[in-house]
Amino acid sequence: MALLDILTGTKHPSGDAVPRTPEELRSALLALNGPQTPFRVRNATPAEGADLVAEWSRTLPAGTGRLKERTVKIRMRLVPETREVRALEELWEVTSVALGNTPGATVNRTYNRGRVADGREWTWDRGPDGRMRKTEVIRDRPAEMKRPVQGAVLDAGWTWRGVLFRL
């Protein structure tokens, strides 16, 4: 396995996986949608420059008076000639901080691409015994989306190729 494959999260199917057609792979990915699924897989829009998009979004309380919205998208292009799915992971975070009793909030926006990790944030506060303790205020798991999507690709006998710039 090449160093770039490790950095981008490229995965290869097992040797006994039977290669499926692009239509079968597309159907398998779209079949991941369901009422209990914490994400959705949909056809991409022309502006997204992909074939399919898997999308996971959460709004989380981030401590006193703060909200954090985290959206992870995996844009996927199916390349039938090499039986690989080129996948570009993107993360948008919007954090809003309420300004006391005044309407409005300050908003911080960030964007990242590449491998998206699970998010955790902690804060320090005093426990019932008066001692300082570390309390988790945010825990979100975009891996809840990535694992099944990646698994469907690998089970179909295709390679999952992580990319950083172009699909």
Image (cartoon, rainbow, N blue to C red):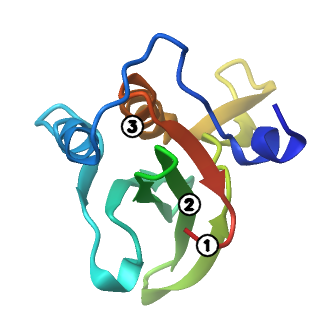
Judged from the image, the secondary structure of the residue bearing numbered disc 1 is loop
Residue contact between numbered discs 2 and 3, judged by CB atoms under 8 Å:
no
The quadrant the N terminus occupies is top right
Q: Amino acid at mark 1?
A: Arg
What's the residue type where badge 2 is placed? Leu
Residue under the point 71% across and 43% down: 123
Q: Which of disc 3 and disc 1 is earlier in sequence? A: 3
Q: Which residue bears the numbered disc 1?
A: 166
Mark 2 and mark 3 lie on one chain; the one further toward the N terminus is 2
Q: Position of residue 43 (x, y in %)?
A: 23, 63
Q: Which residue is mark 3?
A: 149
Q: Quadrant of the C terminus?
A: bottom right
**Residue 113 % position (x, y):** 65, 65
For the point 40% across and 39% down, which residue is it? 145
Say what secondary structure mark 3 lies in: helix
Observer-nearest of 132 and 11: 11
Q: Quadrant of residue 144?
A: top left
